[in-house]
């Protein structure tokens, strides 16, 4: 593999769930991902009670601070992606909507407390409230629309796993998918595992969006590189990445495997992958020179 990778949306791997993992388990995943040329990640947390989320934020903040002092052969924690809590109950997907809260500045501050500086991305259902979006944008925390029933981005900078957990395109209606596709300033996450999106939908995205606004992600579950059933969002997820009702959760593939599939299917070139799974992320995440130097090692 001649290209480096950054994964902005990953829930774990190797049997490790970032929502529940301890220090040693997280370090194991970071080392294993590095072996696969995944140089940096935004560990992604689904909805849970406030105290559990806060404890994980503290842990990732500790690991990030340690890495910036001395990092060996492990993927760099670039900041946490909060995908849970501020989502639409109507588009909860695999997540537990009982733990969702209205997107508000107060609820956000109560959740993250003194760990705001480790937050890199927040996924929000923008139809629920825009005050939090304005607050986060002012703090240079990336806002992404996702798990949404809305039709407008309302100031969000990107879209979480395009087409998944949102209203589909209809030729006579407005939709958040359509807005993101026709707006050349909006970044879109793409789960390109050929399961969450078909090959033809990927080709449509590539024809519609500028390549420098596409972010390849894995949405990797703890079951990737593990096998067997797991518990995720308090639900049993089988080896196909679905719960007992057939609801599709994240991917059972890490980003390196997804990229190899895209090459094999001749959907993308290595140059495309280097752009959409590394260079675009550096720009989008607004990384500093020290972080970029570590990623390029």
Image (cartoon, rainbow, N blue to C red):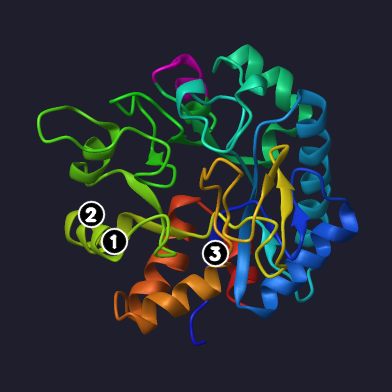
Where's residue 231, x and y in %? 74, 47
224, 181: nearer the viewer: 224
**Callout 3: SS:** strand
29, 132: nearer the viewer: 29
Q: CA distance from mark 3 to mark 1?
A: 19 Å
Q: CA distance from mark 3 to mark 2?
A: 20 Å
Q: Is residue 258 left or right of residue 235?
A: left
Nearer the observer: mark 3 or 1; the answer is 1
Where's residue 181, x and y in %? 23, 45
Query: Which mark is drawn over residue 141?
Result: none
Magenta stretch: includes residue 4:
no
The answer to whether residue 140 shows anywhere in this view is: no
| Residue named by callout 2 | 209
Magenta stretch: includes residue 130:
yes
User: Considering only order in the chain, which callout, 1 or 2, is on the residue closer to the N terminus?
Assistant: 1
- Identity of the residue drawn at 50% across and 50% down: 285
Q: Are marks 2 and 1 in contact (CB under 8 Å)?
A: no
| Residue named by callout 3 | 6
138, 29: nearer the viewer: 29
View extreme (left): residue: 172
| Residue named by callout 1 | 202
- Identity of the residue drawn at 46% across and 29% down: 91
Q: Are marks 3 and 2 in contact (CB under 8 Å)?
A: no
Q: CA distance from mark 2 to mark 1?
A: 10 Å
**Callout 1: SS:** helix
2, 135: nearer the viewer: 2
Where's residue 150, x and y in %? 34, 23
Q: Is residue 145 left or right of residue 121?
A: left
The span shown in magenta is: 127-135
User: Considering only order in the chain, which callout, 2 or 3, is on the residue closer to the N terminus?
Assistant: 3
């Amino acid at each position: 593999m001649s290209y480096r990778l950054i994964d902005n949306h990953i829930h774990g791997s190797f049997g490790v769930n970032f929502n529940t993992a301890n220090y040693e388990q997280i370090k194991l995943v970071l080392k294993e991902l590095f072996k696969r040329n995944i140089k940096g990640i935004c560990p992604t947390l689904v909805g849970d009670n406030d105290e559990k989320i806060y404890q994980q934020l503290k842990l990732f903040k500790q690991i990030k601070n340690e890495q910036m002092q001395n990092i060996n052969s492990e993927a760099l924690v670039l900041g946490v992606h909060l995908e849970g809590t501020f989502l639409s109950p109507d588009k909860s997907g695999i997540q537990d909507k009982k733990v969702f809260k209205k997107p508000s500045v107060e609820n956000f501050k109560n959740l993250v407390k003194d760990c705001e500086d480790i937050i890199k991305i927040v996924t929000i259902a923008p139809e629920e409230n825009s005050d939090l979006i304005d607050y986060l944008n002012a703090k240079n925390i990336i806002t992404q629309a996702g798990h949404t029933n809305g039709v407008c981005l309302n100031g969000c900078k990107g879209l979480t796993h395009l087409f998944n957990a949102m209203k589909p395109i209809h030729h006579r209606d407005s939709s958040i998918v359509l807005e993101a596709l026709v707006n050349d300033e909006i970044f879109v996450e793409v789960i390109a595992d050929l399961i969450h999106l078909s090959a033809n939908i990927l080709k449509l995205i590539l024809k519609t969006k500028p390549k420098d606004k596409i972010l390849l992600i894995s949405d990797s579950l703890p079951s990737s590189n593990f096998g067997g059933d797991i518990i995720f969002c308090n639900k049993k997820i089988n080896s196909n990445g679905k719960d007992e009702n057939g609801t599709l959760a994240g991917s059972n593939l890490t980003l390196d495997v997804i990229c190899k599939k895209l090459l094999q299917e001749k959907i993308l070139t290595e140059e495309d992958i280097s752009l959409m799974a590394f260079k675009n992320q550096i720009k989008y995440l607004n990384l500093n020179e020290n972080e970029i130097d570590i990623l390029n090692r």
